[in-house]
Image (tube, helix red, strand yellow):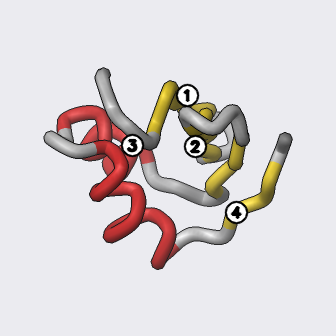
Amino acid sequence: MPSSVVANMNYFPQTSTLRILFTSGEIYDYLKVPAAIYEAMKKAGSKGTYLNTVIKKRFAYKKIT
């Protein structure tokens, strides 16, 4: 999953939380993200573009670190 923006991502189906570790070291949780959105992001050619165009506009988030 090479990306210049997203270093890693994890999905927690119990809470529908998508956790993104950015290459900067910051970690954000995106809340109430459907599993289908996570699956689509995994398949996206550009994780950063998908994050910016689909996820950031639709889902609340909180900074973890």
What residue is at 63 percent from the left and 55 percent from the top?
A: 30
How far apart in space, not on screen, are marks 1 and 4 (Cα)?
14 Å
Q: Report if the CB atoms under discs 3 and 4 are less than 8 Å apart.
A: no
Q: Residues within 10 Å of mark 3 (few under 14, many from 20)?
A: many
Residue that appears at 69% across and 48% down: 29
Give the position of the C terminus as an image quadrant.
Answer: top right
- Say which of 41 and 35 sits in front: 41
Q: Quadrant of the N terminus?
A: top left
**N-terminal-most mark, 3 or 4:** 3
* Residues at circles 2 and 1 in contact by the CB criterion of under 8 Å: yes
Q: Amino acid at mark 1?
A: Asn
The crowding category of the residue bearing disc 4, from other C-alpha atoms within 10 Å (few below 14, some 14 to 19, many at least 20), is some
The amino acid marked with disc number 3 is Tyr
Q: State the SS at label 3.
A: helix
Q: Does the CB distance between marks 3 and 2 fall below 8 Å?
A: yes
Judging by the rendered image, the residue that carries numbered circle 2 is: 18
Residue named by callout 3: 38
Seen from the viewer's position, the closer of residues 15 and 63 is 63
Query: Is 47 on the left-hand or right-hand side of 62?
Result: left
Q: CA distance from mark 2 to mark 4?
A: 9 Å
Sequence-wise, the earlier of marks 1 and 3 is 1
Q: Tell which tag, 3 or 4, sits nearer the viewer.
A: 4
Image mark for residue 10:
1
Along the polypeptide, which appears first: circle 1 or circle 4?
1
Helix, strand or loop under label 2: strand
Distance from disc 3 to disc 2, alpha carbons, whole Å, reads: 7 Å
The amino acid on which the numbered mark 4 sits, given as a three-letter code, is Tyr
From the image, tell me which residue sits under label 4: 61
Tell me: residue 25, above or below residue 36: above
